[in-house]
Image (cartoon, rainbow, N blue to C red):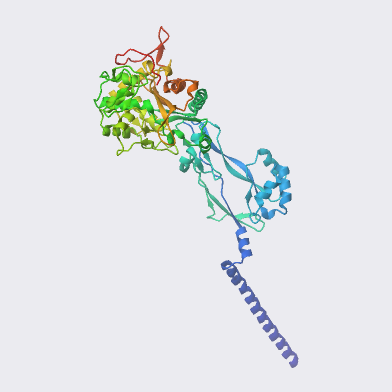
Amino acid sequence: MKNGAQTQVRQCQRIRGWGFLCLLFCSALLLTIPIRVIWLQQSPSEPLQASIQRSSSRSTPLVRRGDVLDCRGRVLATSSVGRRAFIDPSLVDDPLILGAELHQAIGLSGAQVQRLLAGRLHRRYVALPNLLEPWQVQRLEGQPIAGVFLEAVPVRRYPQHLDAASLVGMVGQEHKGLAGIEYVLERDLQAHNGRLETYRDAARRPMWVPPSGFEPGMDGRDVRLSIDLVVQRYAESRLTQAIKELGAAGGRLIVINPETGAIVTVAEVQTHGPDAPTQQRLHRVRSVSDPYEPGSTFKPFVWAAATSAGLARSDEVLSTPRAVGHRTSFGRLIRDAHYYGPSTWRKVLVKSLNSGMAIVAERMSHQSMQHLVDQLGFGKISGCGLPGETAGLVTSVQDWSNYTQTSVAMGHEIAVTPVQMARAFCAFARDGSMPSVTIRDRTHDEGVVTTRIFDPAVAQLTRDIMHDVMNEGTGRRARSTHYSMFGKTGTAQMPKKEGGGYHQDRYISSFIAGAPLQEPKLVVLCVIEDPDKSKGSHYGGSTAGPVVRDLIDFTLPYLGVAPDLEPTSKGTTNVASVGRARGANSPSREPGH
């Protein structure tokens, strides 16, 4: 019994010893697990690092770029959702087989697939180049292809197609503005992407979203322009027709509301020339980027400034020549298209006499002419909001000479953009003040900044005499039978691109007008570039004038403005509103400026 008890004690001791060793071993083993976890967290191996990255995913929820609207809310540019396919090369067993499957499913050639995957087999995402058509989406959804997936992407669409295309511009693949309004107003239109982070299991199934894993996106803001799509369509159509009939290289047409400074229309056509394809591709707005010499359309500004300064009276008779030309005090010979002999200062503007403008320009100081040019905003950008705007060309104070003084009085040796010219002319359609202009919607006077240019009485007088231009002078071919207009024609020789000087037989013809006479609602400028003389007259009154008249006759009824002319017994028209004080002068034949 004693030996048995001792044996039993020894067995218990062995059991306790082995049990302690097992406990110690298990404790050590369990302790290594958290140590290993901590180690792997601090310094994971490359395979583990890749696995950790695949356990979570980050995506960008779709957001919407803002719409571009015209002044009445018509959509010029909008965003929708399209479908695009992409390839995960890691899931593709044989690129050749994949190419054959894609060719059969959506018509994508095998060669294109090989080029897309070349050098990209290590990637997880290779997008197919084009958006899918609905039938292609249906095929890929109905017959899935291993390694090929579908994703939703934003698509920019232009419902009006070519209408106002140069103004609206375009966006790139990243949905960022590249040209036109899309580029200028990128800050307003741009959508701000959000973020969604998801943790996934080994089978890539979503498990949960961490508290900080979601940031909502923000859609872009809609932008309403001052452009009226109906007027824009008519302007583009009428300008295209005129350019074709005249055989011209191009043309520009701009309409401004003088009350608000809102740009209603900017139409541009360019048919030929070395840079025509480039202009169209770049969506360049030439009405703010390419200056031109305004010619005689600049004369009303100088006429009003000299009259306001008391340097000439409308009834003052000037010694304009009967023939040959006028010789300035410094020996420059100034020619007119037609000679009328001594003429009143009023007649100088009606008949567009260069000689009379030169005579009065010599009475003005260089500083006063320079101040006028600066006040009118020439040589400075208008800040209208259109892309690529330039300041134009104005002779510097240091280089200003007597020759420059007389040239500027006739609209030469100065280059302006159509937007600058139309804005300055608004001073005659208002009370002598020039409004700030904008491409953004401005339906009320609120926000309009004005600059006083002329005394209201002088602005009204100049406007009345420019109405005489339509009846007695160079604008007779542009008269409307429905609305009383005031305007001025311009015909300037085209400058040579190389070597300086001017072409002797190539012209820039223009016409600018406002209507109706008593309460102007529109200012319209048309510039015709390099019209073909063999197809008719190259003067502004007969080339650009009818375009301006037709646009006024179309737009004013559309805006609800009643005609202010009534037919007379002889079939002509008279102003049906308040009479005007006018200087006496008998009509004579049109000089053809």
Quadrant location of the C terminus in the rendered image: top left
Question: Which residue is at the front of the view, 536 or 101?
Answer: 536
On the image, which quarter does residue 365 sit in?
top left
Say if 512 sits above or below 124 in the image.
above
The x, y position of residue 149, in whole percent, is 66, 48
Say if 508 sits above or below 88 in the image.
above
The x, y position of residue 591, in whole percent, is 38, 18
Quadrant location of the N terminus in the rendered image: bottom right
On the image, which quarter does residue 309 sit in?
top left
Say whether residue 270 is left or right of residue 575: right
The x, y position of residue 337, in whole percent, is 37, 21
On the image, which quarter does residue 467 sit in?
top left
Q: Which residue is farthest bottom?
A: 2
Say if 210 sits above or below 68 in the image.
below
Question: Which residue is at the front of the view, 376 or 21?
Answer: 376
Question: Which residue is at the front of the view, 302 or 86?
Answer: 302
Say whether residue 158 is left or right of residue 386: right
Question: Which residue is at the front of the view, 257 or 15?
Answer: 257
